[in-house]
Each structure stands twice: as C-alpha cells, then as structure tokens.
Amino acid sequence: MTTHPETETDHTTSAESEPTSLSTAAARNLATTTKTPPQMQGISSRWLLKVLPWVETSGGTFRVNRRMTHTLGDGRVQFTNTGAAVSVIPTELREIPLLRGLTDEDALRQLADRCEQHEFSAGDTVTDAGGPVDALLLVAHGKIHRIGRGKYGDEAALGTLTDGDHAGDQALTPEPGEWEYGLRAGTRCIVLSLPRAAFQEVADRSPALRDHLHAFLSRAIPRQNRRGEADIALTSGHSGETVLPGVFADYEIGPREYELSVAQTVLRVHSRVADLYNDPMNQLEEQLRLTVEALRERQEHEMVNNREFGLLHNADLSQRIPTRSGPPTPDDLDELLSRRRKTEYLLAHPKAIAAIGREMSGRGLCPPETELHGTRVRTWRGVPLLPCNKIPVADGTTSVLAMRTGQQNQGVVGLHQTGIPDEYQPGLNVRFMGVDDKAVVSYLVSAYYSAAVLVPDALGVLEDVQV
C-alpha cells in the first residue's frame, strides 16, 4: 500500500489550526472594558484665567472711575498706501497735540497732501541732535532709535519710535528750537515729514487753523503730575502762619464702563443616549464638561484679543514698547518691567518663551524657577513668565504682556457675575431648552465675562517680538 505524504501533511495542518481555548475576541464580549473619560487636545493651561482676580459685576456693568487727566494727542497716526506711495490719513493728524480738536477737515487734507515721503536704511541718520527742528516727522514703518548724550559724552538710548509714532511737534509752533536728541534708523524705515514752511503756508490760508493755533498756544495748561493728572498743590517745610493752598481731586466726567461679554452654544443630546448609555459615565456630564472646556478656551481668547476689552487692544499707548533689535532680549524685558510698579505676571506665547530662553542662554543667564498653583514656571527678575497660546503670532512676531493685578493694586481684573440662574460654574450657566420632535434634548450653555484695566500703567505690552 502506497503512502501519500501530501495527505499526511494536510491532516496535520488542519489539526493544528483548530483553537484549543477561548479566543480573546470572544472573551471581550463578557468582559467590562476599562476606559477613560473623553480626552480633548484643545485644553490649554489657561494661566490668564487662573491668575486674574475676579470682581463681582452686579448689573452686568463695571465702571472704572479715574482722576481727570489733561494729556492731549498722545495717540498714534495711521497711514494708507497705494503701491510704494505712503500717505497719512488726514483726520489722523488730530493725534498731534497741536492739532487735537481741529474741525477744519480741508486744512487737515492740505496738511496731509504736503507731507513728503522719505526712506532710510538701517543705521542712517534721520536727524542730528542740536539741529533746527524744521519738520514734523511721522513714522509710517520701521524702527527709529532716539539717541542722546550721556553725562560724559557717551551715547545714551532714549527710546524707540515705531509705526504711527511722531516727533518734532514743536516745528508747528512759533519757536521750534533745536532737536534735543538725534534719530537713527534701526531698520528700514518710511518717514513722512511735514516741513515747517508747508505748515505755515496752510495756516496762512486757513482762518480756522490760525484760530485753533492761537487758542491752543494762549491756553493756560494746568499743572500736571508725571501721569498727566491735575497736580494737587501741597506745602511742606513751612513755619508760622503760611497760607495753605486749597485743592480738590477732579474726576473724569465720562468714565469708561465695561459690559459683560458672553460666549454661548447649544448642547444637544439625544434622549436615547442619555437614557440607555449612562453607565459607567454620565453622557450629559461628559458632554457638558467638554463644552465648558471649549467655552473657557474661547473666554481666554476673547480676554486677550477682543477689540473692545481684550488686553492686547486696551494697553495704553504709553505702555507699548517695541523690542530693540527683534528677538526678546533681557534688556527688552527689563524695559517692560520698568514701566510699572509691582509687575506680577508676564504672559507670552510658548514660542516667545522659547525665544526668550534662547536669548538668555546666549548670554549665559539661567533665571530661577518658581512654583505657581502647583506648577514650576520660569521667572525673570522674580516675575513668573507664563505661557498663553491665545496671544497671536503673525509674520513671525508676537507680543509679551506684563501686568499688575487686583483692585487694591489698581491693576487688571477679570469681571463676572455669580449667582445667575441655573449656574453650573461661577459666571457660567446651563439652561434646559426643551425636547424637539426628534427626541433631542437641548441645553443653552453661556459664559459671561470681561476684563478691565483700572489704570494705564497696570498693563504693558512688548511688541514686535521675533520668535
């Protein structure tokens, strides 16, 4: 009898392929799966919401009362361009102190038309200290360094002019005098100049401009402190029956009011899901948790970027400074800290924090860390440097925020109202909206918030930070 090896091989293979125990795929049908709650990549540290003191805002409105200030025309001028030709917007000339309040738009248009465009390369001299002030200079683009002389004749940096800044206002007055400092281009710059002769020509033709200049120059300017507030006259070191000055602290007539903003969404959950699939995790609670996280992320974004109350747009112009060379150096951070007392926090995009770290490493610096809310964070001069990914990065540049917080410190505060109907978290409520004809249950989720800067020096911004 002949044996066929093929047949024996097939029989052996068939026997080995039969399972001898229960498979894991089948066993899982009887097992309870170990699972996590739903995970979400969009959750960030949200340091701004953590460190801001929150003020109860009854009635949904927060009014910031301040002392009367007399600072005039300290804004920035805006420009427009057609190709390479740049021109100043006529009405923006009212940001110049001497032209603040001028109503003759035709005169403003004539002044704008007489502005001459100049371009400078990095290192070029724009003006020399001691030279006559013969033109008003408007910086349309770039950085210009103000250079003075120290006590022993060495150069001293006096600050930087950037887009929208101006210099040489005294060229529009009868006695312009001389430049007290020199101007040197730090980058490629576009500057518009309004010659003194051109200004005088327009003034000779415009009675409204002449009257405005006469009224401005003859007006008695009240004594002010270094913040622009009306000075409070005091007497000290006297003896005998000296006549004491009588004073009062005036207030702003129209103080700013902040209204609570809102972020809302409608959460929808099918009743069948809520009824049958709530073990071991409550479906509605998990849906609410993720929705609230998204609302809080949007809240922090608005508190940084909103044009009405966002911190980036509400920093006073005098508290905005550019970097000296582009990257965020320790010198830039020191300049930012020097603009206010008791800076408590620095906030920057993670890319900006990395750039700061590179600059410090390049200088051999290793600032200490500190613990804040249970987390180790970097510091500079003892001030925590906190990441905030809501600060935008555009064209490779971003900003760094420096702030003092709290009402007692006259700082930055967050605004909310607690105790609202159907409150789920402070300042956030969840309202049942009903069940539709598809058995879908709807909930309105709302978060109410805002932010306020109590005094201008509470918040500063380091701009044009290259990352």
Image (spheres, grey):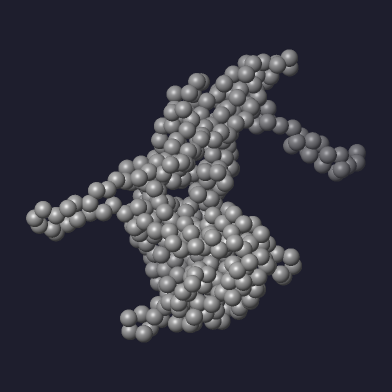
Circle count = 0
Quadrant in which the C terminus is drawn: bottom right
Residue furthest to the right in view is 1
Q: Residue at x 26, y 54 (%)?
A: 233
Q: Residue at x 68, y 27 (%)?
A: 26
Quadrant in which the N terminus is drawn: top right
Residue 8 versus residue 427 in the image, above or below: below
455 or 216, which is in the foreground?
Answer: 216
Figure quadrant of residue 139? bottom right
Residue furthest to the left in view is 240
422 or 267, which is in the foreground?
Answer: 422
300 or 366, which is in the foreground?
Answer: 300
Residue 204: percent from the left, percent from the top? 60, 69
112 or 183, which is in the foreground?
Answer: 112
Residue 78: percent from the left, percent from the top? 61, 60
Q: Is residue 57 left or right of residue 202?
A: left
Q: Residue at x 27, y 48 (%)?
A: 247
Residue 466: percent from the left, percent from the top? 55, 65
Figure quadrant of residue 225? bottom left
Residue 157 versus residue 339 in the image, above or below: below
Residue 148 versus residue 303 in the image, above or below: below
Residue 297 versus residue 318 in the image, above or below: above
Figure quadrant of residue 278? top right
Q: Is residue 435 left or right of residue 381?
A: right
Q: Is residue 47 left or right of residue 40?
A: left
Q: Residue at x 56, y 33 (%)?
A: 262
- Residue 403 can be seen, yes or no: no
- Residue 177 can be seen, yes or no: yes
